[in-house]
Image (spheres, rainbow, N blue to C red):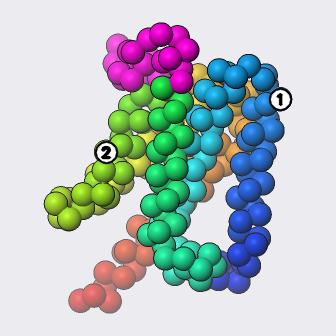
């Protein structure tokens, strides 16, 4: 189903990813050049984009190695680590700018408030998902459900970006952020389908 990816040259994949990041940087800078604002907004958008790319890789284990010339786990883990650092920089920078420590605590007074501030819960889920992969040897088979929380984190982060982030009023950023999240959902369903299809063969 996904083997056509093997026909895509490495330069095209890398160029496509580079274009996404350059578009994000361009549109963020177009929205203002205040150092604090740029840092906060750029960390959020590039962090979410990097986590989206990491999540989208899941159904393409063989393709990643074939096209990029590196093991899937090496590419996936590096992308996830970069995304983790960038997405953490977003609330850290905002907390320093505003002098507030409560920005890391999920808001639970209402569903609307929770979703609007969904990045707080998303950050916790990102760390849980990444740590589950790091300590999968200790967690046994239970690591996979915890690791899958990354998908929920991406959905929450996207909702937060749409409700709270001013940048998504820019149509380019709106398309990139929401389009990539749709691709993440598609990748999640493709991965589930792969496992479902492989299950009968295992018996």
The image quarter containing residue 132 is bottom left
Give the magenta range: 93-118
Would residue 167 be found to the left or right of residue 172 on screen? Answer: left
User: Which residue corresponds to mark 2?
Assistant: 128
Q: Residue at x 57, y 56 (%)?
A: 53
Which label was assigned to residue 30? 1
Q: Residue at image x 16%, y 60%?
A: 138
Q: Which mark is residue 196?
A: none
Instruction: Mark yes or no: residue 74 visible.
Output: yes
Image position of 128 with respect to 156: above or below: below
Mark 1: secondary structure? helix
Q: Is residue 103 magenta?
A: yes
- Secondary structure, mark 2, is helix
Which is nearer the N-term, disc 2 or disc 1? 1
State the image coordinates of residue 173 (x, y, percent, origin top left). 73, 38
Placement of 174 over or under 14, stated as above or below: above
Q: Is residue 121 above or below residue 76?
A: above
132 on left or right of 106: left
What residue do we see at 36% from left, 51% from top?
130
Q: Residue at x 43, y 42 (%)?
A: 153
Q: Position of residue 133 (x, y in %)?
A: 32, 58
Can you say whether 101 is above or below 138 in the image? Answer: above
């Amino acid at each position: 189903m996904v083997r056509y990816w093997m026909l895509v040259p490495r330069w095209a994949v890398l160029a496509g990813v580079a274009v996404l990041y350059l578009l994000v940087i361009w549109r963020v800078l177009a929205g203002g050049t205040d150092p604090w604002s740029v840092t906060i907004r750029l960390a959020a958008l590039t962090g979410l984009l990097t986590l989206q790319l990491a999540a989208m890789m899941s159904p393409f284990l063989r393709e990643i190695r074939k096209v990029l010339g590196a093991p899937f786990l090496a590419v996936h883990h590096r992308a996830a680590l970069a995304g983790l650092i960038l997405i953490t920089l977003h609330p850290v920078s905002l907390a320093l700018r505003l002098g507030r420590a409560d920005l890391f605590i999920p808001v639970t007074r209402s569903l609307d408030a929770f979703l609007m501030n969904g990045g707080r819960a998303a950050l916790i889920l990102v760390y849980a998902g990444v740590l589950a992969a790091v300590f999968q040897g200790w967690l046994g088979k239970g690591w996979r459900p915890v690791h899958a929380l990354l998908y929920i984190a991406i959905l929450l982060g996207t909702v937060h970006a749409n409700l709270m982030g001013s940048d998504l009023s820019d149509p380019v950023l709106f398309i990139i952020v929401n389009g990539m999240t749709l691709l993440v959902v598609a990748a999640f369903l493709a991965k589930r389908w792969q496992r479902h299809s492989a299950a009968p063969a295992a018996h």
